[in-house]
Amino acid sequence: ALWELLWRNPTAQPNPAESAPNSSSPKRQPVEIIRNRIVTVFSEVLTQLQDWNNRREFTPPSDFHVQMVAVDDNFISQAAIKAPVLIPFADREKIFTAQLAAVKQQHQRHGEGKHFIIRRDHFCKDACNQMSALSEEDLRGLIRVTFVNEFGAPEAGVDGGGIFRDFMDDITRAAFDLQYGLFKETDDHLLYPNPRSRITDDQHLQNFHILGTFLAKAMYEGILVDLPFANFFLSKLKQK
């Protein structure tokens, strides 16, 4: 039923001809509002059922997915936003990758990008300070990294991409380390934000924001970050 509603109204955006004033417009508006509300409620219910199924399976996960048929790519993208539960994760990943490629095409990189100078003995501080200084446009561009030792001498190696990936791996590993104070873990070693992170650093909220920037950059560059988050934290991120 939810798929049918999305199919009949994939974008919820009337075309210019339909938006022109006419005698039937006032009647159509409530119908569209009701339809959109039904889509939202159905999606929330199915998502909740899927979450329960993920915790204690009562039906095969594929039962939540629809069979993909030959439909417009834009419709699939809208369905992924309004009712992601209907689309298998692998297909949602393909949609995300395609949309990311389109964004990169619009913002083609020019020049040398930004250059980070990172002191090994002040790794997290230097990484966070320099990342937080970047604009949105800078974040889409190239970032080269040079590590320097305690004497200020640069380490050997030219960053052709590999050093930056190592840098991203190191900073996420360090930032999510329990000793850093931003995150705690459950008995099952699943991560969630430390409710008392303020005690470890007055700038804890800013640090969370910067950490989110690092994760966004990793996604933009296609860098896999393996972080075992707790289910209740993921649910909170999805505002459920």
Image (spheres, rainbow, N blue to C red):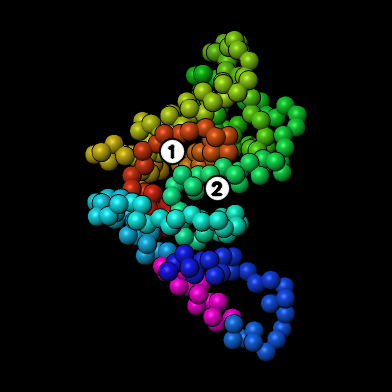
Q: Quadrant of residue 186?
A: top left
**148 to 90, vertically: above or below:** above
Left or right, residue 53 beside residue 135: left
Name the residue: 60% across, 57% down: 72
> What segment carries the magenta color?
29-42
Q: Residues within 10 Å of mark 2 (few under 14, many from 20)?
A: some
Residue 137 is tagged as: none
Residue nearest the viewer, comparing 172 with 120: 172
Residue nearest the viewer, comparing 144 with 101: 101
Sequence-earlier tag: 1 or 2 = 2
Instruction: Residue 34: say if magenta.
Output: yes
Q: Secondary structure at mark 1?
A: loop
Residue nearest the viewer, comparing 78 with 122: 78
**228 to 48, vertically: above or below:** above
**Dominant secondary structure of the residues highlighted in magenta in the image:** helix
Disc 1: which residue: 201
Residue 210: image x %, image y %? 53, 39
Instruction: Residue 3: say if magenta.
Output: no
Name the residue: 50% across, 78% down: 34
Q: Residues within 10 Å of mark 1 (few under 14, many from 20)?
A: some
Q: Is residue 209 visible?
A: no
Name the residue: 25% across, 51% down: 57
Q: Is residue 5 visible?
A: yes
Three-letter amino acid code at the position of disc 2: Ile
Left or right, residue 63 beside residue 28: left
Q: How many marks?
A: 2
Q: Which callout, 1 or 2, points to the residue nearer the camera?
A: 2
Left or right, residue 90 beside residue 189: right
Q: CA distance from mark 1 to mark 2?
A: 38 Å
Disc 2: which residue: 95
